[in-house]
Amino acid sequence: MPLIVSRQAGGVYTPPVLTPDPYVPLFPPLDTTRPLAVYIDPLGVEWPLSDPGLGWATIDEVEGLGAVEYELTADPHPRGGSRVRHSQPVSRVLNWPLLIWGDTHTEFLTRWRALARAFTLARRLNLPPGRLRIFRPDGSAREILVRYQSGFRGEPGAGFTEDTAIVVLYAEDPYWRDVKPLTLSYGSAAPRRFLSPFPSVSSGRVLGEAEVWNPGDADAWPEWTLTGPCDGITATNHTTGEAFTLTYPLTAGQKVTITTDPPTVRGPAGQVLTWALNWPGAVLWGLEPGLNDVDFAVVGAQAGASVDLSFVPRYETA
């Protein structure tokens, strides 16, 4: 607070002497040595959350960027204590406080309404979730899928030229993930010697043995794209001991997409082909953190047949 000094000498009133505080800008310039945050709404519009030049800024009270929380299921042990039977990651809740302001009430209100609409779009289940993306000073980035839960209520006594929204975001999948997927492609136009990581075409089969590295902290759930001409595929993860076989003929250029989370199989016209898996033994497997020994066989493959394996690594923290 300023120091106010006044005195009255000889019956003559001397006005107070005001000693101002050192000037400190209310909204300092953007610090590129700190993490930056961007919210991407369900329509794909990007909303920077760390640039005061736009009329809003993140307050340093963010919560929810740490490690995933787990719910443990344990059974009593006859020798005392208990033994954990299952560890279940639970959904994450993030608190993201935003200070929003304007030079006039109209300017403030326009910004408040625009941000509120961008976040609340993600509550609509017919739209995809929003994405909260964190950029680090080294250029790396991770993101998490979120839906709006609450926060645009405003603070008592505020709401004329500034207000604070404590945005609460709900993440069904509590793990952070890379912004772009990793994709491995396998295929060959003619018979040839095996050249890692590209498999050969031999005796009507595309054979592939590969070491797939998952750099994340949690299981990653891949998506397979099988392109004909071929009669199907058998894919095995020897690290987990799981496998599946899909039997379905494809002509040249036709594709089948196999998604492991959620488990779905879609044919060339988008039709459901889940019935073409080798039930009940089929397991649409994931990739464990670290090294995974994978092999597959594309049955009846001819020139032009190929397989793409794509996955997004997932992490405990932002």
Image: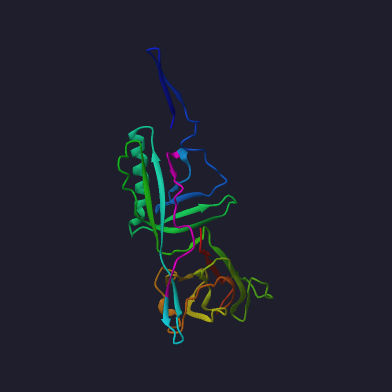
Q: Residue furthest front?
A: 10
Q: How is the image coloured?
A: rainbow
Q: Which residues are magenta?
A: 54-72
Q: Is residue 105 visible?
A: yes
Q: Is residue 235 left or right of residue 45?
A: right
Residue 71 position in % (x across, y down): 42, 71
Q: Looking at this view, is 198 or 170 the one in front?
A: 170
Quarter of the rendering containing residue 14: top left
Q: For residue 66: magenta? A: yes
Q: Which residue sits at x=44%, y=24%? A: 18
SS majority, magenta: loop
Q: Looking at this view, is 130 or 155 the one in front?
A: 155
Q: Is residue 266 visible?
A: no
Q: Is residue 170 above or below residue 31?
A: below
Q: Which residue sits at x=41%, y=21%? A: 6
Residue 210 position in % (x across, y down): 62, 74
Q: Is residue 200 above or below residue 142?
A: below
Q: Which residue sits at x=44%, y=29%? A: 2
Q: Is residue 73 above or below residue 130?
A: below
Residue 48 position in % (x across, y down): 46, 46
